[in-house]
Amino acid sequence: MPFPVKIAGIRRKLNPILTFTTPSLIFFKEARKERHRMENYLTDQEFKLYSSLIYEQSGIHFSSMNRSVLESRLKERLRNTNLANVSEYYQLIMQNPEEMKILLDTVTTNLTRFFRNTAHFNAFENYVIPALVEQKNKKKDTLLKVWSAGCSTGEEPYTVAMILKEKFPAYMNIEIIGSDISLKSLMTAKESFYSAQKVDKIPEKYLQKYFEKKRDGYQVKKEIQSMVHFDYHNLKYESGLKNIDVVFCRNVLIYFDSEAQESTVNRFYKAMTNFSFLFIGHSESLFGMKTPFKFLKTEWATLYQKNIGNHQET
């Protein structure tokens, strides 16, 4: 884990009031009323209460810029729980941890796709994998561990699995962990079935080799499924993972404020091996953070590295 149209000059050319029919005037009056209702769906106090709670529970930051997103998601939960107002719903989530998880699931954005940001996967294939193979051969280490943090519906970890299946030595073992705060997304990831639209960015050689065509979509084959296991995890807390060689956490940090971003990144650092790599979103940066990660520019993409006690220059 992250929306006015300027029409200046139109009024000078055409007076819209003179050209609208009576039904049009009624429509716009109703639209203004609806917009007013949306703007006042949460009072400022209620917004502060909910946004603070969500931040405390997940690190996800809501500001005035994305307030409407929180309001729309709350309306959805009120409809689904048949509650009358946000005060009643607040009491429910304070008493029911499972509903709190559902709310956090609802407010997250689960936009992802296979081979998203190809440059990252080119750097992974052409730089990171060779560097890790060389390092592990030196240390006689035969296990590679990759963590897709904020994996959503599974496209990213399955992409990683396919690349490793093709490019990583067969004598080494591979463990890929996909974690997310959205239980609904994790269920989709575990099912590993995707519509034709979802797989349209997959290179043909991978699609033919690692997916089985079904009547209404594509199923990830068992040899790729078996390389990935999924688990619920809230990035605000320690994961319990250790000795991770590569972390993918792309387009997740943008939903956190600076404090939560820095804490999350440093938890990654603790979970990673002394020679390891971190991929974040192309619009994200560790600039200004107090973190030991080193910026790394490759021919294909930029990323970050943890490199302690190794003589190899990267």
Image (tube, helix red, strand yellow):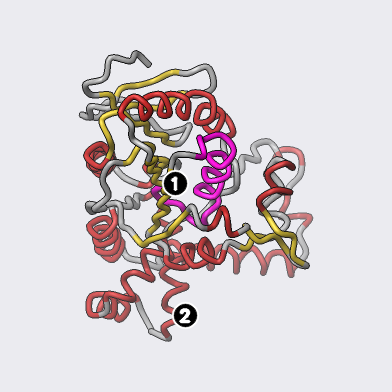
The residue under label 2 is: 79
Question: Is 72 rendered above or below residue 61?
Answer: below
State left or right for residue 239 relative to residue 135. left
Quarter of the picture containing the C terminus is top left
Q: Name the front one of labels 1 and 2.
A: 1
Q: What crowding class fits label 1: few (fewer than 14 Cα within 10 Å), some (14-19), or many (20 or more)?
A: some
The residue under label 1 is: 2
Question: Is 275 rendered above or below residue 266?
Answer: above
Secondary structure beneath disc 1? Answer: loop
70 and 155: which one is in front? Answer: 155
Q: Which residues are magenta?
A: 148-170
Q: Is residue 154 inside the magenta stretch?
A: yes
Question: Is 265 rendered above or below residue 210?
Answer: above
- Please, what is the three-letter code of the amino acid marked with disc 1? Pro
Question: Is 300 rendered above or below residue 259?
Answer: above
| Residue in the image at 79% along x and 55% along y | 19
213 and 156: which one is in front? Answer: 213
Does residue 1 appear in the picture of this structure?
A: no
Report which quarter residue 119 is drawn in.
top right
State left or right for residue 10 relative to residue 87. right
